[in-house]
Amino acid sequence: MEKGEEQRLLEESLNKALDEAWTKVNAALEQVVRASQGYEKAVWLAAESVEYASLLFSLTNDLEDVDPPLPSGRTTETLPLVKDSVVALQRVRESNHGKKMEDYANLRTAVQGLRTAYLGLLKKPGRQGQSLTRS
């Protein structure tokens, strides 16, 4: 496979992954706002989807060795974390990959926010159900 063809396929896959991540992050936000039963799973699915988009973004843009700094001192409350992740992903979608380092940092911020939200939900007292994390 030629380099140009490989790049085109990566970009197509990235765009599809970003669209899927956008759908799942917004679904998670909606479920968190409504406190729907099982919204933990929606947060986990959103985190996984954004993580995959982040991976494709790094491969597409040769950023495999880049580890952008994450914001510190963030809240641990679920709703603000999910909202912040939606905003970060929206920034990536609106930039059209023009600022690669900034976009990648936004993707990693979204992933971290969703992971933190999900892990916070697992630690809540009285939570029933099973962990969705892999062993």
Image (cartoon, rainbow, N blue to C red):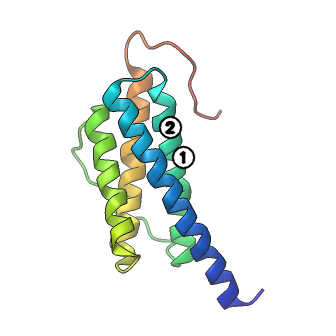
- Specify few, some or many for label 1: CA neighbours under 10 Å numbering under 14, 14-19, or 20 or more: some
Q: Which mark is residue 48?
A: 1
**Is residue 89 visible in this depiction of the protein?**
yes
Q: Which mark is residue 109?
A: none
Q: Are marks 2 and 1 in contact (CB under 8 Å)?
A: yes
- Specify few, some or many for label 2: CA neighbours under 10 Å numbering under 14, 14-19, or 20 or more: many
The secondary element bearing badge 1 is classed as helix
User: Looking at numbered disc 2 in the image, what kind of residue is underneath it?
Assistant: Trp
Q: Is residue 76 above or below residue 51?
A: above
User: Looking at numbered disc 1 in the image, what kind of residue is underneath it?
Assistant: Glu
Label 2, label 1: how far apart the Cα atoms are: 6 Å
Q: Which quarter of the figure is the C terminus placed in? A: top right
The secondary element bearing badge 2 is classed as helix
Residue farthest toward the right in the current orientation of the protein: 1
Residue 42, percent from left and from top: 49, 35
Residue plotted at (24% across, 49% down): 72
Tag 2 residue: 44
Viewer-closest of 131 and 32? 32
**Is residue 56 visible in this depiction of the protein?**
no
Image quadrant assignment for residue 75: top left
Residue plotted at (53% across, 54% down): 20
Q: Which quarter of the figure is the N terminus placed in? A: bottom right
